[in-house]
Amino acid sequence: MKRRLLLCQYTVIAAFIVLIFAPAEGRGEISVEAALSHLSFSLAGRAELSLTVHGASQADIELPEIDGIQLSSRGQSRQIAVRNGEVSSAVVHTYQVEASRPGEYTIPPIKVSAAGDTLRTVPLHFTVTKDAPAHLGGDNQIAMLEVTATGDHYPGEAVPIEIKAYFRRDHRVELHSLPSLQGDGVIMPPLRDTPRQEEEVRNGQRYHLLNWKTTLTGVKAGRHQLFFQLDASLLTPRSRRSPGALGGGGLFDSSPFNDPFFDSFLGNSQRQRLQLTSPTITFNVIPLPDAGQPADFSGSVGDFQLQVTAQPLTVDPGEPISLRIAISGQGNFEGMEAPAFPDHPGWKSYPPTAEFSASPEGDGFSGEKVFTRAIVAGSEELTAIPTISFSYFDPRERVYKTLFSDSIPITVRPGGLTAPPPPPLPRNTPAKLQEEGEPLLDLAPIRLESGPFTAEIIPYFLQTWYLATFALSLFALLALFVAHLLRHRLAGLGRRRQRRRQLATELEQLAALGDNDHPDNFLTAAKATIARHLGEHYGLEPAALTLADLEQRLPANSPLLALFSAAEEVAYGGGSRSGGNGPGPWDRAKLASCCRELRQELEALQ
Amino acid sequence: MSRSLFLPLAIFCVLATAGFGRADVEIDHLFAEGNAAYSRGDYPGAIAHYEAVTTRAGYSAAVLYNLANSHALAGNTGLAVLHYLQALRLRPGDPDIAGNLALLRSDRGLFPPKTGPAARAMDLLTLPQYSLLALSIPALLALAALLGFRYRLSRRLRLGLVSLTLLLFAFALTGAVRHYRLFDPAVVVQADARLLISPFPAAASAGTIQEGRLVYPEKRYNDFQLVSDETGRRGWLPKTAFARVQGTFPPMARDPEDAGGR
C-alpha cells in the first residue's frame, strides 16, 4: 500500500516535470507576435515590447538598431495552455523601450528564427513626447508652489502668509526641504515639519496640498522682492521583470515581485530633481511713525492685551513676589521684551523669564507671552505693586497704544528679616585644636553592633503601632464608659423596682392598720415609710430625717408634711389619736384618706 | 509534597537564604570596616563606610551614632549634629548619643538660646516621651474603668482620678504640640552659611549662621528656603547649606562643592 502511494506521487511529479520542461515542438504551427505596452510615452517614461513566439520553446531574435531608441531585455517567460486535452506553449520575450529624445518612432519588423523557420513581426509605431516641466506653467502641472500676496507693512509687524505646495496625486514626489524664503529685508520664523495636508482639485486634477501658515516680518524699510523655493524629487517607477525561479519558460515565471507595487516598495524607481519656485511677491515695508512714539516702546507691533498678577500678596520684607506679566494677542512675539518694572526706591526687581505659548491655530503670530519677574518689597510701608505699562504700535489703526495694569494691593508684614545680632564665635574648632596639639573631643565610644535597621525615621506618633494603640485605648475607654453607664442605669432600675415593691407592701400594711382603726400605729408606720422613701430620694439617712428637713424640701401644703408632723406628735407628744368608735380627726375614713394621699405622693416621687 | 515540587522549592529556599545571608555579611563587613577606620583615626574612611551601610541597609541608631562621631572628629560639625539628632529619633534618651551631642555643642559654642522656666519645664520631656505619655493616659483611664467593675471607688476618688489623668493628658498634648512645631528641624551643614534678605545669590546678607545650628524651614523659593533659627532670626538659605533631620539620606551624597567645599 505504501509502495503504491509512493509510485503515484512519483508519477504525478514526473508528469509535471514533463509538462513544464518538455518542448511543445511539433504540436502546432510556429507564429510570432509583437506588441507595445504604450504607443505614446514621455522622455521620462518607457514602454514595454513583448515578443510572443508560439509553437517553439526556443527562438533566435534579432533586434533592430533604432536611432534614439534603446531596447533592453527584461527576460522571457513561458505560457502553457491546455485546450481540449491539447497542450500548446508560447515563449514571451520582454524588452524595455526607452527613448533619448522625443519624436515619432517605428520599430521595424523583427526577425525571429525558430525550429528552422524564420518569421518577421509587423512594424510598430509609437511617439515619445517631451517631459512636461514640473513647476512651470500649464494646466496640468505635476507640482507648484504658491504664496499669498502681501501689501504695505510696518517694520516688526508680523504679516500672516500661507505657503502652499501642490503635488499631483498620481505622481510620487519626495520632499528634500521646507520652503525657503529668498529675498532680503524680511524674516520668517522656522517652518514646522508638519504642514497641514489637504486635497484640492485644480483644473480637473487632484492635488495633494501641503499648507504652511507662517508670518513674514519686515526688518528694514523698502520694497522687497521675495519668492520661495522648495526642493523635491519626482519618483518615476522603473519597470522590472525578475526571471522565474527556474530561469523562465516555466510555471513560476510570473514572479510576484514583478508587480509594480514592489517597484516602489523596493526602491526601484528613478528620481528626477524638481525645484519648485513660487511667483515673486513684493513686500513693502514702510517706516514706523515718529510722532506719538511712547518712551517705553520697544518695537512690539500688533494687537495685544496685558494682564498682570502677583503671588503671594502678603509677604515679609525681603520675601520675593512673583509678578506674572502676560501679554496676549497677535503680533511679533519673537523679539518682544518684558515691560520694565517702574523705578521705585522701595522695590527691587530681578531679571524676568519669558515663555511663549502659541495659540492652537498654529499661525505662529498669535498666542501669549508670559514674563515672570521676581520683585522684592524692601519696606513694610509699601502697600501696592506699582502699575506696569506696555506700549506697542497697532498697524491696523496706525497708532501707538499703551496698556496699563491695575495697581495690585499687597501687605508687607512688619518685622521680617532684621539685622542680626553678632554670631557667637565657636570656642574650639577642630582645626584650632589640631593646630594647638590638643586632644579632640572626648566622645563616648562608638557602637560595635549595627543594631536593627529601619527604612525611614518616623516619629512615634506617626507610626502605625502608636496610632493603632492610641485608637484602641480610646475605643476601650469609650466602650468601658458606655458599659459603666449601662450598669449604673440597670442598677438604678433594679433599685427603683425594689422600692416600688417595698412601697406597695408598706402601703398594704398601712391600709390594714387603717382598717383596724389603729391611728397611732398607722401614723408611726406612715412616718417610717415617708422617712425611708424620702430619705432615699434626697440622699439622706432615713433615721436622721426630721420634720425640718421635710419642710425645707416639700411644699407647705404637702400631705406628707402633715402626716409626718402628726406622727411626730404621736411619737414625741405622748398624745393618742385613738378615736374610738365615733367620728373623730383620725377615724377610719381619715386614715383611709391619708393612706390614699400617701400612696399618691410617694408613687409620684418614684 | 511531590518530589518534583520539593527540589525546586528547596533550591529556592537555599538560594534565598544564601542571598540574604550574603547581604547581611556584606553590611556587617562594611560596618566593621568603618569601625576599624574610626579606630585608626581615619575619619573620612569611617564616614564612607558608614554611609555605604546606611545607603544599603537603611537607618540604624548605632550606625548614625558612629557616623556622627566620625563627623564630629573630622570637623564636620553640622553633619555630626544632624546624625546625632537622627540617631536620637531612633533611640530617644540614649545617654551616649545625647551626651556626645551635648559635648559637641558645648565644644563648638552651639549653646541653646536662654528660655523661661515654663519653656524649660516643657522641655523636660522630648516629643517621643510626650507622645508616649499621651498614649498612656487613655490606656490608664481604660484600665481604671475596667477596675471600676471589680472594685467600687468612691465618687470623690473617681473624680480626682479622672481630673488628674485629664490634666496629664492636656499637659502631654501641649508638650507634644509644642515640640512637634520644632520636631523636624534642619541643621546648617555649611561652614560659612549666611542668611540672606531675599532668595537670590546676590541678595544682601542678614548675617551669618553657625554650622550645626538648628533652623526651621518655612517656605521655598527656587533653590532657597526661608528659615528661622532657634533665636527667631529669619532669612533665606540656599538649599545646599542645610539638611533636614528627617530628610532623605544620605545628605552627603550631594556634590561636595554644594556642601561648602567639604
Image (cartoon, coloured by chain):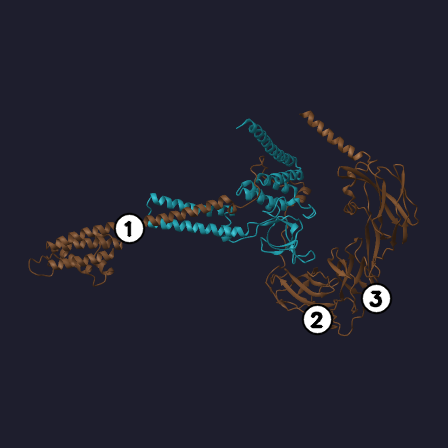
Few, some or many residues within 10 Å of mark 1 (<14, 14–19, 20+): few
Q: Which amino acid lies under the numbered mark 3 shown in the image of this protein?
A: His
Few, some or many residues within 10 Å of mark 3 (<14, 14–19, 20+): some
- Regarding mark 3 in the picture, which secondary structure is present there? strand
Q: Position of residue A394 (x, y in %)?
A: 73, 70
Q: Cα distance, mark 3 to mark 2?
A: 30 Å
Q: Nearer the viewer, residue A414 or B244?
A: B244
Q: Which amino acid lies under the numbered mark 1 shown in the image of this protein?
A: Leu
Residue at left 11%, top 55%? A515
Q: Say whether residue A344 is visible.
A: no
- Regarding mark 2 in the picture, which secondary structure is present there? strand
Disc 2 sits on a residue from what chain? A
Residue at left 21%, top 58%? A600
Q: Which chain is brown?
A: A
Image quarter in which the C terminus of chain B is found? top right
Residue at left 18%, top 52%? A506
- Residue underneath mark 3: A224
- Residue underneath mark 1: A493
Same subunit, labels 3 and 1: the answer reads yes
Q: Which shade is chain B?
A: cyan
Q: Position of residue B254 (x, y in %)?
A: 67, 46
Disc 3 or 1, which lies upstream in sequence?
Answer: 3
Disc 3 sits on a residue from what chain? A
Q: Position of residue B156 (x, y in %)?
A: 34, 50
Q: Residues at badges 3 and 2 in contact (C-beta under 8 Å)?
A: no
Same subunit, labels 2 and 1: the answer reads yes
Q: Is residue B95 above or below residue B25?
A: below
